Amino acid sequence: DCDKIPFHPYFSVKDILGFMFMLLPLVALALFSPNLLGDPENFTPANPLVTPPHIKPEWYFLFAYAILRSIPNKLGGVLALAASVLILFLAPLLHTSKQRTMAFRPLSQLLFWTLVANLFVLTWIG
């Protein structure tokens, strides 16, 4: 029993110390040099009437941006984006078997891999 180390005082202090060593440089960077890692575009004066053509969303929103950009009508783009999200909610309701594994759901597998391929393509062209 002497080979065991109690968790609370030793491992808790070790984890808190490691967390502080990781957090200290981040806090120092945020407090003393907040613009060091910023985008230089943030310092140009904004023109509220003209959107710059080079602005793109982050990579995880590119599929939605591609859907919105592909349809010229604003309402149609929003409806297409909403429909693409609703498909995710309807996928579990397509198969009503007692078996819950994906091995017996070929339609759900096909729809899932089609969704993954569509997300990759839309993100790539976004």
Image (tube, rainbow, N blue to C red):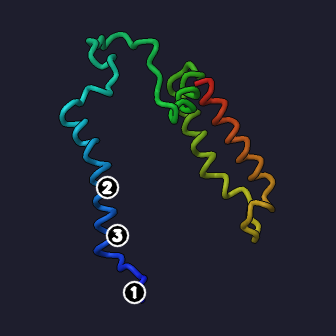
Q: In which quarter of the image is residue 7?
A: bottom left
Mark 1, other Cα within 10 Å: few <14 / some 14–19 / many ≥20: few
Q: List the residue tagged with mark 3.
A: 11
Where disc 1 sits, the SS reads: loop
> Amino acid under label 2?
Phe
Spot occupied by residue 98 in the image (x, y as percentages of width and height) = 75, 71
Q: Is residue 116 above or below residue 47?
A: below
Q: In this view, does 81 lie above or below 5?
A: above
> Amino acid under label 3?
Phe
Spot occupied by residue 88 in the image (x, y as percentages of width and height) = 61, 48
Q: Quadrant of residue 19?
A: bottom left
Q: List the residue tagged with mark 2.
A: 19
Mark 2, other Cα within 10 Å: few <14 / some 14–19 / many ≥20: few
Q: List the residue tagged with mark 1.
A: 2
Q: Quarter holding the C terminus? A: top right
Q: Is residue 32 above or below residue 125?
A: below
Alpha carbon of mark 2 to alpha carbon of mark 3: how far? 12 Å
Q: Which residue is drawn at 60% across and 22% down?
A: 70
Where disc 2 sits, the SS reads: helix
